[in-house]
């Protein structure tokens, strides 16, 4: 069963970011997930524009850039200029007056457009955008910090989004508190990928290759 594994780089060791990127590439990670926060849309500051640009320059592996910022349309070009065609950019619909305008800019730049859906955001409020985007990132925790607990009620939303995926034509990704049991449950249901943070990947004192091999080797029953 194929599903993507994406490294949440806000959890990486910034004492040697170049080595982290190299090690994750060697381990076979599918993409680098870049969380950019402005201290306004969420009450935290995370990765910067320069962090993102460095990782883009240090690897050929795709980037998934998750913009947790207010009114991304105001500054989207400075991010798009530093990415490569085929990278993904997620925005939060609540953060923008006209999110479809921002998504159009992402598409025109040759990037993959995506939206991130918060635990408290209903499918009904984003249903038209589901026809436009290619990826949907489901937040299973409230955005802004690593190491939070999974919010069980999000599972009902995931089930609905999975049922609509074929009709709408998007791919569905899990972000937040991703443990092995969540992969075992939702990969067989059709989840396309999982963002890995401190729960499974980082700060384990183990080689990334061994960890990723173990995850891909989970006994997943279709």
Image (spheres, rainbow, N blue to C red):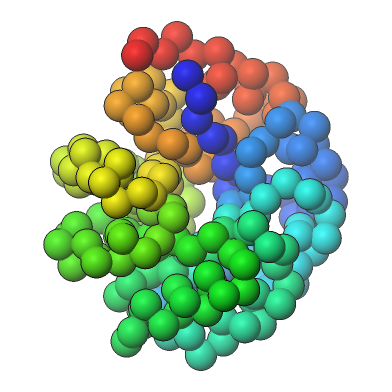
Residue at the (51%, 90%) spot, across then down: 74
**Is 91 placed above or below 193 here?**
below
The x, y position of residue 119, in whole percent, is 25, 55
Task: Tell me which corner region of the image, top left, top right, bottom left or bottom right, holds residue 198.
Answer: top right
- The tally of labels here is 0
Residue at the (36%, 49%) spot, across then down: 169
The x, y position of residue 213, in whole percent, is 64, 18
Task: Tell me which corner region of the image, top left, top right, bottom left or bottom right, holds residue 201.
Answer: top right
**Is 205 placed above or below 198 here?**
above
Residue 145 shown left or right of residue 120 in the figure = right
In the rendered image, which quarter contains the C terminus? Answer: top left
Is 135 in front, or is 38? 135
**Is 16 placed above or below 196 here?**
below
Residue 212 shown left or right of residue 218 in the figure = right
Residue 111 shown left or right of residue 178 in the figure = right
The x, y position of residue 56, in whole percent, is 76, 60
User: Can see residue 88?
Assistant: yes
Residue at the (36%, 78%) spot, across then down: 99
Residue 42 shown left or right of residue 7 in the figure = left
Residue at the (63%, 30%) spot, across then down: 204
The x, y position of residue 160, in whole percent, is 18, 43
User: Can see residue 198?
Assistant: no
């Amino acid at each position: 069963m194929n599903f993507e594994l994406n490294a949440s780089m806000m959890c990486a060791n910034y004492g040697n970011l170049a080595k982290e990127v190299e090690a994750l590439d060697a381990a076979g990670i599918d993409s680098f997930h870049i969380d950019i926060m402005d201290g306004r849309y969420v009450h935290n500051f995370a990765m910067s524009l320069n962090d993102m640009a460095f990782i883009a320059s240090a690897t050929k592996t795709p980037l998934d850039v998750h913009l947790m910022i207010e009114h991304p349309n105001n500054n989207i070009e400075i991010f798009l200029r530093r990415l490569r065609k085929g990278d993904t950019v997620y925005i939060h619909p609540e953060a923008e007056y006209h999110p479809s305008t921002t998504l159009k800019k992402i598409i025109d730049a040759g990037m993959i457009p995506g939206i991130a859906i918060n635990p408290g955001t209903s499918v009904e409020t984003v249903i038209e955008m589901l026809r436009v985007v290619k990826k949907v990132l489901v937040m299973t925790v409230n955005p802004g910090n690593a190491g939070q607990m999974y919010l069980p009620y999000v599972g009902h939303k995931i089930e609905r989004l999975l049922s609509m995926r074929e009709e709408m034509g998007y791919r569905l990704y899990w972000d937040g508190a991703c443990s092995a049991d969540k992969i075992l449950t939702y990969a067989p249901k059709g989840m396309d990928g999982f963002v890995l943070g401190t729960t499974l990947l980082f700060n384990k004192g183990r080689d990334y290759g061994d960890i990723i091999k173990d995850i891909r080797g989970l006994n997943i029953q279709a």
